[in-house]
Image: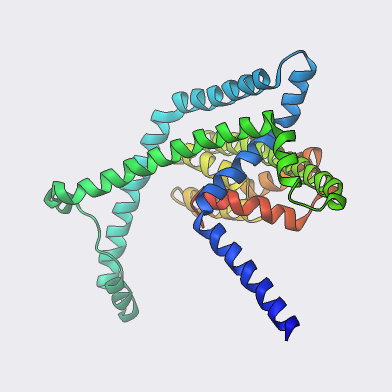
Amino acid sequence: MKQVMKYTAVIGTTLAIFYILWQFKLVLLLFVLSLFVAATIRPFVNWLVAHKFSTAMAQLLLYVVGIGGILLVLLLTGDWLLQEVNSAVNWAMVEYESLHHQWQNGLSWQQTAVELLPPPFTLSAAEQTDLQEMLPIVVEAAQGISGVVGGLLLVLALSIYWSVDQHRFERLWLSLLPVKQRAYARDSWREIETAVGRYLRSQTVQSVLAALFLGVGAAVSGMAFPLLLAVFGGLAAFVPLFGGLVTAGVAYGIGSLHSQWVGLGTAVYTLALFLGLELWVEPRFWGRERRSFLLTILVIVPLVEAFGLW
């Protein structure tokens, strides 16, 4: 009876912990992402510290350079990206309206399926939309954007605090463990942190290279939406294996706007690019002998959650 009560208490405690973590998943996600950022830039911080920079100054310099680079890229490509998004949305609306009308006069299964789909969004419907109906959408979008910006700032702040006072934080949470297990837990934690940082640096380099080669290749071949393809491929590069397959499917769809052969060639080019990144670029940062399937999953899940795909 005591054994049953013990197992029941353990299971109940575990479920309670998972429930609490789920309720505070946003806070937990921001904290985990801040640890990811700190682990990613740690070698660069150590290099600057070895060259007479303080830890805080080294981090500040890296964040200024990193954020400045991202803002510069957005400044140079922002208008172009917005134009492509607008063109892609308009094209999708026209194609959806055409498909909707075709299926209305098509086979019986097409007529049944089209009844389950939302009606196409037309200009007359947009003109008839009341301002009061649009206001909640605008407010929700503004709240979403402000939430993303605030979350990014909080991630940066937490990563700075973690890097500066890492040893103090480690002593704090290690004090919760038995004395005999503290050294092993500390070494395991630092090994995991090093592996996570190495993995994210590898994926970041692959992301930049994928976006660069996809964008240049699509622009040179005269394809539509080259920047959108580059951005999508750069983000998909963070997802091993499936990222390349999904990007190849998107590339085929965009290339098929010109012809089936262009779509097929673009898909093959995309697969070859991701395969090259996997075989030649990734081993330089993330050796095969250091890979761990569980660690990869633990890194991918917060990233997928952060991008809103979960």
- 155 vs 46: above or below: below
182 with respect to 16 (left or right): right
- 96 vs 89: above or below: below
Q: Position of residue 57 (x, y in %)?
A: 65, 18
Q: Kindly identify the residue that appears in the image at 79 percent across and 42 percent down.
A: 190
35 with respect to 136 (left or right): right
Total numbered labels: 0
Q: Position of residue 223 (x, y in %)?
A: 48, 41
307 with respect to 279 (left or right): left
Q: Quadrant of residue 224?
A: top left
Q: Kindly identify the residue that appears in the image at 53 percent across and 28 percent down.
A: 70
Camera-side residue: 58 or 92? 58
- 302 vs 162: above or below: below
Q: Kindly identify the residue that appears in the image at 30 percent across and 78 percent down.
A: 112
Q: Position of residue 206 (x, y in %)?
A: 67, 39
Q: Can the viewer see residue 222?
A: no
Q: Of all residues shown, which one is farthest toward the front? A: 2
Q: Kindly identify the residue that appears in the image at 28 percent across and 59 percent down.
A: 98
Q: Position of residue 113 (x, y in %)?
A: 33, 74
Camera-side residue: 1 or 55? 1
